[in-house]
Image (spheres, rainbow, N blue to C red):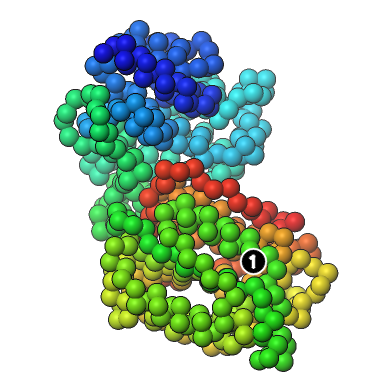
Amino acid sequence: MEMDFQKALLEVGKSLSTDEVEALSFLCTDILSRKPVTLDGASNLFSLLMKEDRLSAGNPQLLVELLLTIQRPVILQNIKLSLPSPSTLISPYRKLLYRLSEQITEEELGDMKFLLKDIPRRRLEQKTTLGVFLEMEHMDLINESSLEYLETIFKSVCPVLNEEIRLFRKEIWHPESSPSTVKPSQTPKPSSRTDFQGDETPQLLSQPSMNPSNSTNGEMASLDTVNTEKNNPESQENDEVLCDYPMTGKRGICLIVDNFDFSESYKNLTNTLRNREGTKFDRDALKEVFGWLGYEVDIHVDYNADQIKSLFTRIGQQDHSQYDSLVCCILSHGMEGKVYGVDGKLVEIKLLIECIDGENCPSLIEKPKMLFIQACQGCKEQYPVQPDGIEDETTRIFADAKIADLRSPVIADLLVGMSTVPDHASFRDKFCGTWYIQSLCKNLIKCVPRRVDLVSILTKVNFDVSGMTDFSRRRKQMPQPAFSLRKRVVFPVPEKRPPEIGALTKDNS
């Protein structure tokens, strides 16, 4: 049995990258009496754990918890190892730092090192994010009960990560709302993201049963809904009332209508609509991101007005009873409250929404319906431009709009993400895609693993897009989400690695 277990450990080691071995060593910092001498492979770490009686064939619990924490459940399946009992060995604090490290980009790491004036520069030069965290601990800048220094750094580098620290504090100091966490003075308990329940002892099994991606935290709060004051009864009451939409079945359909070729519009308009150069970048990004989130992506290119209406009618008539939600994305020219078909005819957004409301699509009742529209809602800009086909050919930044009436429909469990506010233009880079869709996709990739809710993600999109501009530094854009959601939309964290998409810089170069 022991020999079989050591062979399994050898297979585990071969499956891990250098960064993953470093992560395992970091997670074991509070468990081992001394740190491994080298990180060239996992064998040294496993040997130390076995020597200190932390890991054995009869007690593989730590190995399972480590691999689940770094999101490598496939390795456990390969060695036929499962754990039906709760994990208890790695502290929530150590897991928090690991999760934070996974979400920090190389550029953000460089900025962190630059701001860490309390640590000699030479000690940070070759360090990974986990290495930097260890140096901060060695200098007594951070510990389980004191993360203010790290929050100050994050405020300048990646402020959204401070939300995860806030939630960690809430779980630690309010164990009544997160039973799997404890105060720092107590023995570390399992993270609130632990997936297993029951009291069975760990053992080698031939039929592993695990799915860490389904791990949820019903008390996880969004950036925009939680009062951060401690001991606030009103805040605690809100936490109990506000919950998440169920995301336990098939995620649903992601419908994408991408209109590029507007040559047909010559027959219907005096001022013709130009082709939407760069829209393919948006279509590809949406396909990758929502496919990664588990949606069945359904793409339709160059649809006229009647085809768009027929498509939404068909979607509304489908049976969505096995699905958790519905996502619809429209990429086109537009005017206020309407989008253009490639024939130059307009479709009211209100009519499209009615196709999927509770009356016309009962299988989507009480399920989130998300509609993202990349299209202008007017012509107003900070300086004169001529959108929709009378564009300046010397620029790569184009607008997509005309003007009309907007009537917001009232419907439950709906979110409409508009790329711009009423009366204003929405911009598209022919080499990168639109400011709005690229920011949406980038922030979904960045925030979903942090279990940030969709409304908060769209708030971050608002912040990012509002800071963008063209070469002239005069064009600006302000997206505007509107919703009648009654719960939080929190996408389950996918098992697969997030896709890599081209993202616009704030300078839109």
Residue 231 drawn above or below residue 189: below
Looking at this rendering, what residue extends furthest in the top direction? 51
Q: Is residue 53 left or right of residue 263?
A: left
Please state which amino acid type lies under the numbered disc 1: Thr
Q: Quadrant of residue 320?
A: bottom left
Mark 1: few/some/many CA within 10 Å (<14, 14-19, 20+): many
Q: Position of residue 439 (x, y in %)?
A: 58, 58
Q: Position of residue 408 (x, y in %)?
A: 45, 81
Residue 170 drawn above or below residue 380: above
Figure disc tally: 1
x 32%, y 35%: residue: 191
Q: Position of residue 394 (x, y in %)?
A: 83, 69
x 37%, y 16%: residue: 7
Q: Is residue 503 left or right of residue 306?
A: right
Q: Nearer the viewer, residue 402 or 154?
A: 402
Task: Give the labeled residue for mark 1.
Answer: 279
